[in-house]
Amino acid sequence: MKAWLRRLLGKKARTAWISHPIFLQHEPGNGHPEAAGRITAIETELQQQSIWPRLRGVQAEEASDKQLALVHASRYLNFLESMRPQPGKIYRLDDDTVMSHDSLTIARYGAGAVIKAVDRVMAEKSHNAFCAVRPPGHHAQSDKAGGFCLINNVAVGAMHAVAAHRLQRIAIIDFDVHHGNGTEEVFKDDPRILFLNSCENDLYPFPGDIPAGKNPNMVNLPFSPHTGSIEFREQVRRQWLPRLSRFKPELVLLSAGFDAHRDDEIGRLSLHEADYAWLTHKIMQAAGECPGRIISVLEGGYQLDSLAKSTAAHLYVLTGMGKPPCAVEYDAYLKTLKP
């Protein structure tokens, strides 16, 4: 249906679920937390909570060399290609970051998913989008892999929005438990990007490792281990939401990591799935200058049950279904804790 006809009929385009079967083929090795079951667990939970019918499935396409070159140096991409192992083998770029035979191609599809999401929301074919991709991307720097990541999906999407759609104010919000050092490195000198990042302060890759740049729009929220919902929400209210509102973004990209959940052992923060519903709602309110132009991209989250429930809470809000039942119950509980 054409965008003008949707408006005439008072109907909004669905949230796009952008993915591809190829994402299940990245094989970092037995026992690695970044496993294919992450995406299937999310899909199952979305179906059980009746969120799945609110999503419109869209297949990702591979990002081109030209699109990747907006973020990543050609020598780095050539290096990754040269490290491609034989079928059935893996190559360790570091202790955590592993390539299987098709991993680089799969990572290019991850970046391509975000590019497609940008094009769809800018054309009003989709109201907003969630990119169910792997491997994650926010630790990939312009010329260096790390932290499970090869290609910085969100950064490629942001630069595509600048190059293809001439956007000048893009907000990137990273709520993974790990610092989005790759995204910060890419945009540390680019004031067109507002980068709001939260993380646990004593986890890889350790906030502060990236030298300060010229971009004044960098807001990092490092939290101490065991920080819970009340402190997290208070800091977001104070330090993120006013900056986001003043920035008046034309597009919002979310590095959606769900590993700050209390049940995810990869970190030691103590968030609840309801916190992701709350955060999604607050972002949508504060970014009212770009109604609908919110693209969420899967990053971390490795305990399958908490990952699935947190993503479902996030998408419950993003799809316009209101406040999920888990948030109604949990928010009532939080009120009993306040003095």
Image (cartoon, rainbow, N blue to C red):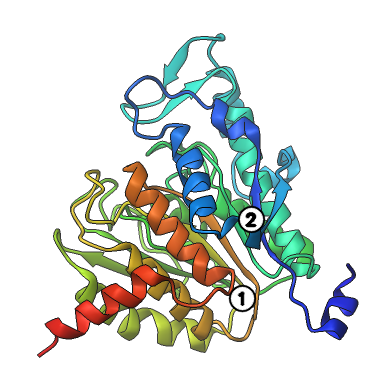
Q: Residue at x 28, y 63 (%)?
A: 272
User: For numbered disc 2, what is the local secondary structure?
Assistant: helix
Q: Is residue 7 left or right of residue 313?
A: right
For label 2, the residue is 157
Within-10-Å neighbours for mark 2: few <14, some 14–19, many 20+ = many
Q: Considering the image in quadrants, where does the C terminus appear?
A: bottom left
Within-10-Å neighbours for mark 1: few <14, some 14–19, many 20+ = some
Q: Residue at x 46, y 50 (%)?
A: 45
Q: Position of residue 66 (x, y in %)?
A: 74, 43
Q: Is residue 115 left or right of residue 324?
A: right
Q: CA distance from mark 1 to mark 2?
A: 13 Å
- Mark with earlier residue (1, 2): 2
For label 1, the residue is 169
Is 46 drawn above or below residue 144 in the view shown?
A: below
- 51, 155: nearer the viewer: 51
Q: Residue at x 41, y 83 (%)?
A: 241
Residue 107 visible in this rendered orientation of the protein: yes
